[in-house]
Amino acid sequence: MAGAEKGGLFSMRKTVLAIVVLCGVFLLASSVAWGEGKTIKVLAMTGPWVSGPVKVHGEEWGKMTGNRVEVIEADFADLFPKMQQAAATRSKAFDILLAGNIWMADLVGWGYVIPLDDYLKDPEVQYETDVPDGIKLKNMFGGKTYGLICDNDNMYLFYRKDVLGNPDYRAKFKEKYGYEYNVPPKTIDELIDVAEFFNGWDWDNDGEIEYGFVRSTKRGAQTYFYSLPWVAPYVVVPRDKAPAQGILYFQPDMTPLVNSPGWVKGIEKFIEMGKRGCGPGLDWVRGDVINEMILGHAAMAIDWGDIGPNSHDVQSKVKGLIGYALPPGAKEYWDWQKGEWVKTEEVHYAPVHCFNGWSFYITSTTDYPDLCWDFVKYMISPEVSAKDVANPFSGYQPWRKSHMQNLEAWVQAGWTEEEAREYIANTLAVTDHPNAVIDIRIPGSAEYMDVYELHLTVALSGEKSVQDAMNDCAAEWNAITERLGKDAQTKFYRQHLGLE
């Protein structure tokens, strides 16, 4: 789950149900005996999502150890400032942070979190055998592990299997466009054609007009995230031809790529989709995307994983009808190293880990680092995490390999084992893709992205050409980099990429 936004259809009324379901976890024996009476304080986003599992499992762990977990909640907008203030004053207000993975560079740069590599040697964690390489990369910064993902955020394609698989519709599409589309669409161009075909008519015979594709386009509604899967296939150089995996935002020397021909083409395709395959208007937010999909009003969307679990809600009209796939790619990319377009025979995919996910960190100011670790270890254990990622009200997405086998909670939530495996397998495929983009983790990342979204929405509205809007964005990005210190920013970015 990215940020604080969820589908509007699913409100706080589900909090009690969420806690009841989460309480079904196995109680694990703590590996360390602790004295009673200690309290560890966890800073987390205001629930029920994200912080809810910490409250439930905190009570379980407290009963096992004789200690107490206090969850201190803050609205999403206040989380980062609270951590920043605590780090600056060396406050002991928090022992554990449940914070965005994208904030790792700041937390490390402030010296506010400790490396966890020695703790991860514990065989009970199964870190080497059960944690995908893509998760390990997100957990690391500058060669050390500082945060531990409990929620695996990335974007992928959701599509109506029954609608796109309809043989009559496929035949009509071929007659109109001259080719037979893939199920699911493999390239961005194909995605736009398929969305256009299914846009603006009643393809499920329910008496209502449906859309081909839905997305968020409103300023301040995570719209910049929704654009990234469109630009990445045109910007990211394949891993075997690049100095690092998933280079998207800047070249390794902090030269912006946001105004490169590849990025511009991706935004132009994003705009083309709006003209050909989407519902009208530029005021849609993430809640609209989720709700339109699960209420059966849209054929496709690219979003975080929450559409999957929410498709099994009691109000869903599409239970068992949603398919999952990598975000579509392209058959060309801009090689920023050579300054030229490169054509490819195979589809070039570059999925994006938008927001990266929520991670546990242990603060450097805590008096109880070992005690904190024991609780974090419990939270990320195979047994506990398997329950959490199957619960749509946790806000957590699958991240362990063993989540593919431990499907009891998914079946209890109304999934078939086959569908659950398909959903989890796709999530892990995106996670471990060799070209996958780990969302940027450098100081000021939120400021860079806020500036980008401003100029993106200018381009979407038609006020400026995409190239002019992105040139303006690149100029502002350079100004931010100079203000924060180019040498320091370059070092942080290279650490983010794993080059240092």
Image (cartoon, grey):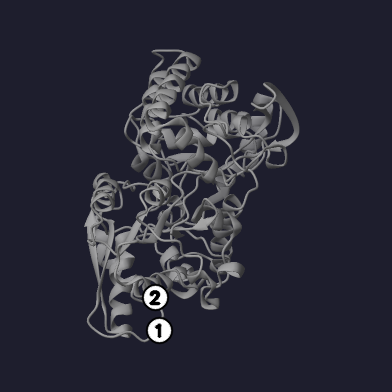
Q: Which mark is residue 141?
A: none
Residue at image coords 46%, 56%: 319
On the question of residue 211 being in view, the answer is no
Residue 126 on image: x %, y %:
56, 72
Residue at image coords 24%, 47%: 78
Q: Which residue is mark 1?
A: 32
Residue 63 on image: x %, y %:
29, 83
Residue at image coords 60%, 38%: 328
On the question of residue 453 being in view, the answer is yes
Nearest the eye: 254 or 382: 254
Secondary structure of the residue carrying tag 1 is loop
Is residue 249 found left or right of 128 in the rendered image? left
Residue 476 on image: x %, y %:
40, 22
Q: Quadrant of residue 193?
A: top right
Q: Amino acid at mark 1?
A: Val
Pointer 1 with pointer 2, Cβ within 8 A: yes
Nearest the eye: 54 or 409: 54
Q: Which residue is mark 2?
A: 374
